[in-house]
Image (cartoon, rainbow, N blue to C red):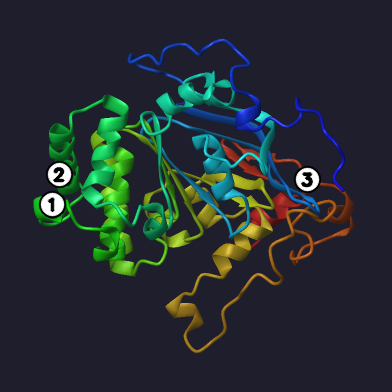
Amino acid sequence: MLPRQSSSKLRGFRHRQGTTTPPPNWPDNEWHGPLLEVENLDVEFHTPKSIVHAVNNLSYSLHKGETLAILGESGSGKSVSAQTVMGILDSPPGFVTGGEIRYRGADLLRLTEEQQRQVRGRKIAIIFQDSLTALNPVFCVGDQIAEMFRVHNNTPRAEAKKQAVQLMKRVRIPSAQQRYNSYPHEFSGGMRQRVMIAIAIALAPEILIADEPTTALDVTVQAQIMDLLMELQKETGMGLMLITHDLSVVAEIADTIHVMYGGRIVEKGTVMEVYQHPAHPYTKGLLDSIPRVEEHHGGKLIPIRGAPPDMSALPSGCAFHPRCPHTQARCLTEAPALHAANEGRHSACHYWREILHAK
C-alpha cells in the first residue's frame, strides 16, 4: 500500500490546471533567452506496488536553431521527459512532483488544458518513435495532416487539403496529390515517418522534439530522415531536441549532448568534447560498445555489463555503481553531484577527473 500524499505534492497536469493567472501572450518579437528551459524536473509513476522514479532532477535548455541530443539506454527517462514537456503525460499514473518547464519564460506546468492546446503542436511539436501506432489506421494520411490546419486554424476543408498536399511535397513524399487518400499501412516505414514529420511541422513550431525518429528504419532511410530534419531546421530556425540511443545519429547532427542514466543527467557538453573525451564511465561504456571495423574485426565487442536499474528501486549512492568498472566505496553510499568539468561541460561522477584524463 502506497503512502498517502497531498495533492500539492502530486503535480500532474490535471492537478495544476487553473492554479495561476493566464501566461503572457506568446510574443512574436525576437526572443533572446532559451526557447525551452527544463529545471529540476521530477516525474513519478504510481503503481499498485511501488513508485517509479522515472525522471529525477532533470535540467536542460534549448535555444533557437540549436540541436540538443538526449542520449541513453531504454528506460533512462528520455521519452517520459519529452511527454512531460508536451503535456501528454498520462496522469494518473504519472505525476510531476517537482520542477518547472518554461517556454519563452512561462511555466507550461501552470497552464490550463486550453492554454496547453495553444502550445502543443503550434509552439512545441513532437515526432513519435513508432509511426505505425502514432497514425490512425482508419483515416487516410492526408486527412490526418490536414486536421492540424482545421483544428488549430479553423481552415476550410478544401484549403486544409491543399496545405496538406504542399506539406507532403515538402517532406518529399512522391506523388503527394495521389497519395493523399492512402492509408498508413500503404506506406513504407520511411514514408510514414515523413508523414509524422509533416504533421509535426504543419503549424511551424519553434521547438521540435524527435523521439527516436529513425527506430526500425534501415541505415539509408535513417540518413534521409535526419537530412530532412536538418534541412527543415535550417529553413525555419527551430530548436531541435533529438531523443535517441543511436550514437552515430547524434554525432552527425547534434550541437550539445546530455547523457541520461537512471532518470538523471550524468554528463553533458558539446558533441565533440563528450565523444572525444568522455568524463563519465557510463558515457565511456556507450562509446566503447560501438562496433568499429578496424578495431573489432574478428574480435569481441565491449558491452556495458549488467542491465539498467529498476526505476522503482534505484541503487544507493551512484545509480551506475553496480555496472561501473571504477566503483569505489564512496560510490555505494554517496550520490555524485553534477560537477562542472569546464565551461559547459559537466559530469555526475566522483572520479570524473580520472575518467576524463584516462587514455
Give the image location of residue 313, x and y in percent. 80, 55
Residue identified by numbered label 2: 165
Give the residue type that dot 3 points to.
Pro
- For the image, the number of numbered tags is 3
The residue under label 3 is 336
Mark closer to the observer (3, 2): 2
The answer to whether marks 2 and 1 mark residues whose Cβ atoms lie closer than 8 Å is yes
Find the distance from the CA under tag 1 to the CA under tag 3.
53 Å
Asked if labels 3 and 1 touch by Cβ distance under 8 angstroms, the answer is no
Which residue is rendered at x = 52% and y = 18% of the image? 106
In the image: residue 141, left or right of residue 200: left
Task: State the image coordinates of residue 274 (x, y, percent, origin top left).
Answer: 54, 51
Q: Relative to 350, is 23 on the left or the right?
A: left
Work out whether mark 3 precedes mark 2 in sequence or the reverse, and give the earlier one.
2
The disc label shown at residue 116, or none: none
Asked if residue 254 shows in the view, the reply is yes
Q: Residue at x 87, y 56 (%)?
A: 332
Label 1 secondary element:
helix
Element type where label 3 sits in the image: loop
* Residue furthest out toward the bottom: 298
Badge 2 amino acid = Val
Which label belongs to residue 176? Answer: 1
What's the residue type where badge 1 is placed? Ala
**Mark 2 closeness class: few <14, some 14–19, many ≥20 residues within 10 Å:** many
Task: Report which quarter residue 130 is drawn in.
Answer: bottom left
The quadrant holding residue 158 is top left
Depth order, front residue of 349/125: 125
Residue drawn at x 65%, y 70% as measured from the top left = 304
